[in-house]
Image (spheres, rainbow, N blue to C red):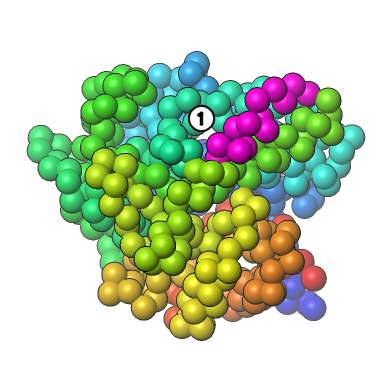
């Protein structure tokens, strides 16, 4: 018991330590700006003890929304020369310096959970945010659909930077003329836990291409070789749209077209079922190839309100192979690498989304996912991610989103 109280306090301390006034950085040094989905998780964490601060987090994020509706993946509020690629490399065109790509749209879903903690305070805040959230979601619907599934145009967009799902499309990129650059991430964290130079050259090449095209979605649609229909984006947008519809109905807001959009996304989500792999999977839009990967994003189907017996079998199999699930990549695959970022490690935030989905659907594996996450944090702290075999901490430490997962879900009795 004492230990749990201690951890609650530690988690709050982390949020407060990473609070930069209106927005929260993921962790000092490695990630010194506001990240899109990290912020939405941070807001959920703050909501456990300060709902007003939680709303401020989301409001600051949406203050960076671009004229076309996109909400960027990084917002560079204050310059930090120690970070690469910074605002001058990205050349974002929003009201605040930012990156030119987005991240999984979980903000509306977190907003609904925050609203439910204090409806009186939340009603006014939702009313102001609602049209902005709708514009962001409409931007996805306008620019990013393939057969109703949602596409990413850069590996960083799915928030799962170096997952094996991108290996095929990344191999098609020849990063000519990418030039010399100095990576900063490997100055903070051991290189063995980060993406390789092969990956990084291609990340930067894609950024340079986006900038050259002024982040014009129409041009990117034809020119960008990297376009992958992805379970992370598809399932999170589907859930976010459902949550917006629910909020809109509760607060009597304009929900025109939402039900139709949800139907399109539901059908799109089903197109991500790979019948040979027997799992939800990523699909390379440029050549129609499956990634053939069971990843932690495959298990977001329940979060999106889609039940699947086949995916349940996969979850049981994968959980049986590791001590601390849910691993980011299939532990039986030869591409599994237990400490390299999104190629194997367990991420508490993904466990939270997967767990919320399982709990909503009264799934028999819900308790196992939550307990594994609880034990991980109790025994190994608030690190960025964890080795699924022995639970050891990996990546950055004092991580905002892991603290938020503890406060909002894993550490609650
Ligand atoms: C890494 C993660 C991404 C996260 C960011 C900040 O790039 O892959 O999901 O948003 O770090 O924590």
Residue 353, given in percent of the width and then of the height, sits at: 61, 57
- Picture quarter with the N terminus: bottom right
User: Which residue occupies 77% across, 35% down?
Assistant: 247
Q: What element carries label 1?
A: helix
Q: Is the magenta stretch mostly helix, strand or loop?
A: helix
Residue 109, given in percent of the width and then of the height, sits at: 67, 43
Residue 292 appears in which quarter of the rendering?
Answer: bottom left
Give whichever of 305, 385 is nearer the camera.
305
User: Which residue occupies 42% across, 48% down?
Assistant: 230
**Res. 12 in view:** yes
User: Which residue occupies 84% across, 33% down?
Assistant: 250
- Picture quarter with the C terminus: bottom right
Q: Is residue 245 magenta?
A: no
Residue 177 appears in which quarter of the rendering?
Answer: top left
Categorize mark 1 by other alpha carbons within 10 Å: few (<14), some (14-19), many (20+).
Answer: some
The magenta region covers 253-265
Give whichever of 319, 190 is nearer the camera.
319
Tell me: 204 left or right of 132: left
Tell me: 119 left or right of 162: right
Q: In this view, does 156 lie above or below 250?
A: below
Give whichever of 302, 56 is nearer the camera.
302
Q: Name the residue under label 1.
A: 141
User: Which residue occupies 40% across, 19% down?
Assistant: 93
Q: In this view, does 9 lie above or below 234?
A: below
Q: Is residue 99 above or below residue 118?
A: above
Give whichever of 360, 113 is nearer the camera.
360
Q: Given the current orientation, which residue lies at the most extreme left position?
A: 176
């Amino acid at each position: 018991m004492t230990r749990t109280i201690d951890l609650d306090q530690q988690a709050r301390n982390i949020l407060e330590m990473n609070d930069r006034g209106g927005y929260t950085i993921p962790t000092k040094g490695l990630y010194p700006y506001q990240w899109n989905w990290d912020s939405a998780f941070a807001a959920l964490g703050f909501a456990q003890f300060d709902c007003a601060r939680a709303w401020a987090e989301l409001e600051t994020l949406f203050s960076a929304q671009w004229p076309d509706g996109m909400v960027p993946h990084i917002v560079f509020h204050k310059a930090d020369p120690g970070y690469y690629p910074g605002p001058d490399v990205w050349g974002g065109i929003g009201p605040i310096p930012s990156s030119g790509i987005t991240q999984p749209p979980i903000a509306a879903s977190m907003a609904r959970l925050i609203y439910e903690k204090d409806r009186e305070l939340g009603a006014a805040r939702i009313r102001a945010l609602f049209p902005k959230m709708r514009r962001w979601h409409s931007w996805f619907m306008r620019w990013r659909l393939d057969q109703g599934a949602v596409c990413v145009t850069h590996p960083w967009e799915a928030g799962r930077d170096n997952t094996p799902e991108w290996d095929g499309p990344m191999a098609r990129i020849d990063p000519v003329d990418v030039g010399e650059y100095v990576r900063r991430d490997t100055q903070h964290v051991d290189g063995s836990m980060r993406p390789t130079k092969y990956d990084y050259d291609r990340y930067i090449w894609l950024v340079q291409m986006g900038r050259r095209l002024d982040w014009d979605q129409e041009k990117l649609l034809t020119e960008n070789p990297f376009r992958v229909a992805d379970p992370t984006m598809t399932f999170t947008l589907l859930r976010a749209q459902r949550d917006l519809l629910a909020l809109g109905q509760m607060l009597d807001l304009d929900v025109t077209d939402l039900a139709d959009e949800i139907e399109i996304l539901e059908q799109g989500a089903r197109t991500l079922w790979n019948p040979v792999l027997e799992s939800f999977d990523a699909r390379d839009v440029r050549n129609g190839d499956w990634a053939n990967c069971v990843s932690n994003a495959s298990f977001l189907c329940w979060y999106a309100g889609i039940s699947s017996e086949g995916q349940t079998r996969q979850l049981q199999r994968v959980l049986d192979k590791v001590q601390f699930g849910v691993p980011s990549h299939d532990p039986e695959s030869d591409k599994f690498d237990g400490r390299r970022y999104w190629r194997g490690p367990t991420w508490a935030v993904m466990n939270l989304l997967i767990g919320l989905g399982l709990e909503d659907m009264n799934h028999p594996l819900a308790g196992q996912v939550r307990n594994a996450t609880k034990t991980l944090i109790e025994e190994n702290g608030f690190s960025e991610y964890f080795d699924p075999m022995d639970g050891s901490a990996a990546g950055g430490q004092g991580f905002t989103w892991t603290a938020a997962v503890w406060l909002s879900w894993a550490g609650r009795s």
